Amino acid sequence: MPIFAARILNEMVWSQDVSRKDLCEKYGVSKSGITQVVGRLIKSGFIEEGSLLDKNNRGRKTVSLRVRGEAAYFLGTDLEGLAIRACLIDCQRNIIASSKRVIGPSWSVSNIMQHWSETIEEVIESSKVDTDKIVGAGLGLPGTVDIENTTKTRAYLPPGKWAELDLASLLSKFGLESVAADNVFCAAEYERRLGAAIGAGSFLAVLIRYGIGSAIFADGSFLSGEKFLIGEMGHMRLSLNGPKCICGQNGCLDAYVSGRTWVQKDMKSDAAIQQELRQRAKMLAIGLSNILKIFFPKLVVIDGIYNDYEYEFGPWLAESIADELQGVKLPVPRIVFGDTVEFKSSVGAALLAADKFLGKYLEKRISAK
Ligand SMILES: [Zn+2]
């Protein structure tokens, strides 16, 4: 019973409003069986009855059930560019506390980790939530994450240095289990659960800020190797003799398209900006098409610096992708720009933690009630 109740609860965190009938159908359980489990979950304070749903039963309304926001919480935090962000979300995906700290370009790794730890502490304290109600923590960062050993994660810290970070220790002092991923996976998880990719069976997500990352969501899960979670699309090389990249190679996509090179450009007029954007759309299209020739989803979600120019940039991108893909007879996938959300990567990281730890957490909590 506790395990089944936890499964139902886990499901409800993700699907929000459901009815008792939905649950009967989904799990093939009798009406009285579901009524018993739901009754127990309501009594223990995990779920509540909500609005009347009008979606079935030939016009007969049924009462919706939803997880109470305060049933459990998830911490998300990310390091990106020159800022650390952290937030705590509840089971109804509301941000209940958040904090952002700007970091200096010349700061040492230990100084950055100290401030990161303080930012997390600030969020937990200001939320007034007991840490035993926090299911786990997700961390986003620009870099390569060793799936089994987050004590040695390699992150790329602006203004251009690789650093080894001990992420597991950062969270374990708060008594929290953690999961880490490149920021692009966090932003992609946000899009999948709450944003532009809701309901998509597969999609390609691209995040262009200081650097460029991509994540592939295929047939229900993100693709990774057995050891590393990597999203370094920026260092895909497009030319052997192109401009020098910060990774040491020449002609990487990053050198043509990243936020790093965008801020360094001296663009004095609107016409110069438009021309630069058009050229960037073309180079990004070549990079994207290199992936699309191997993995072709129906949807590509783009986040980052070009979202402000979506109405010019989108059509240019689609046009150049069409040029690139016509030789292999592939159509242009749907290209969508995500909404601008300040804590997108942090919320996405929190959702990754929810995905990984919620089931086990609920089983423990329900057994203890
Ligand atoms: Zn590079």
Image: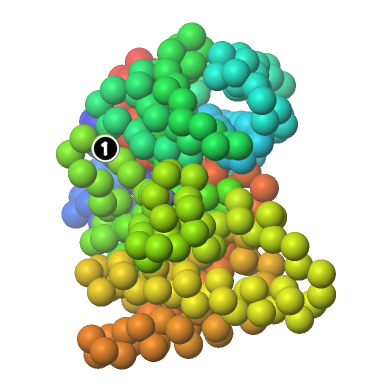
Q: Nearer the viewer, residue 153 or 197?
A: 153
- Within 10 Å of the Cα at label 1, are there few (<14), some (14-19), or many (20+) other Cα atoms? some
Q: Nearer the viewer, residue 348 or 206?
A: 206
- The spot of residue 102 in percent (x, y) is 72, 31
Residue furthest top as drawn: 173
Respond yes or no on whether mark 1 lies under 8 Å from ligand 1: no
Q: Secondary structure at mark 1?
A: strand
Residue furthest front as drawn: 241
Q: Residue at x 73, y 76 (%)?
A: 272
- Looking at the image, residue 17 sits to the left or right of residue 158; the answer is left
The mark total stands at: 1
- The spot of residue 211 in percent (x, y) is 52, 50
Q: Quadrant of residue 273?
A: bottom right
- The spot of residue 27 in percent (x, y) is 22, 52
Q: Residue at x 50, y 21 (%)?
A: 133
- The spot of residue 65 in percent (x, y) is 47, 49
Up-down relation of residue 216 to residue 125 (above or below): below
Q: Quadrant of residue 268?
A: bottom right
Q: Is residue 268 visible?
A: yes
Callout 1 amino acid:
Phe
Quadrant location, the N terminus: top left
Q: Residue at x 32, y 58 (%)?
A: 217
The residue carrying mark 1 is 228
Quadrant location, the C terminus: top left
Q: Quadrant of residue 323?
A: bottom left
Q: Residue at x 49, y 16 (%)?
A: 170
Q: Is residue 18 visible?
A: no
Q: Nearer the viewer, residue 71 or 124?
A: 124
Q: Nearer the viewer, residue 294 or 266?
A: 266
